[in-house]
Image (cartoon, rainbow, N blue to C red):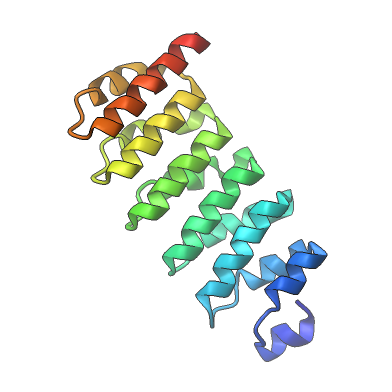
Amino acid sequence: MGILELLLGLKPNIKRLEARGDVRGLTKALKYRRDASVRAEAARILGVLKDGRAVDPLIYALKDRDRSVRFKAAESLGKIGDAKAVEKLAEALTDKDWYVRLHAATALGDLQDKRAVVPLIQALKDEEKAVREWAAQALGDIGDSRAVDPLNAVLTDREVSVREIAAEALAKIKAKT
């Protein structure tokens, strides 16, 4: 995205930025206020590129007004794998939109950072089944023994799939310790 496009408020050419691997242009596209689909697609592509320069702009995008931008930012932060994102992804576990919370849990599982254990344990109590499932999965991926008792408690969840994933997570933790 060139200076002229930015100054004139022209819509970024996301396909061109992707083809060039233009991380700088894509991070600028994350700020294009006129079209959330542009911001969401920029966030998605930044995850594919896995460039550490995108971490701070993606963290900022976790607070975007549009849910698709927020969940794509969370997803991409997990793909990039920079531990700098853990705290803000943990905050995203309380987002008003369950789909954002789900992607934050998934990203934290990808990062496998022990700082995420306590927020993920809290997410085991989420109202949405999918968030509870992915929080349990993430805790199993991290493999921290602090999750054992909370995961044992989830074995009585009203949803069979949540119970099954919690059991798998417990087995993963046991194998790691």
Q: Residue at x 68, y 65 (%)?
A: 27
With respect to residue 154, does 53 lie above or below?
below
Residue 61 lies, in percent from the top left, at: 54, 61
Q: Residue furthest bottom?
A: 8
Instruction: Give the left or right position of residue 67, taking residue 109 as reference.
Output: left
With respect to residue 91, does 144 lie above or below?
above
Q: Residue at x 45, y 15 (%)?
A: 173
Query: Does any portion of residue 147 appear in the rendered image?
Result: no
Query: Does any portion of residue 176 appear in the rendered image?
Result: yes
Q: Out of 84 and 108, give the one closest to the viewer.
A: 108
Q: Residue at x 33, y 53 (%)?
A: 98
With respect to residue 46, does 165 lie above or below?
above
Q: Residue at x 71, y 49 (%)?
A: 50
Residue 176 lies, in percent from the top left, at: 52, 12
Q: How many marks?
A: 0
Q: Quadrant of residue 1?
A: bottom right
Residue 144 lies, in percent from the top left, at: 46, 19
Q: Quadrant of residue 22?
A: bottom right
Q: Out of 60 and 49, give the one closest to the viewer.
A: 49
With respect to residue 66, does 91 lie above or below?
above
Instruction: Give the left or right position of residue 44, taking residue 164 as reference.
Output: right
Instruction: Give the left or right position of residue 4, taking residue 122 as reference.
Output: right
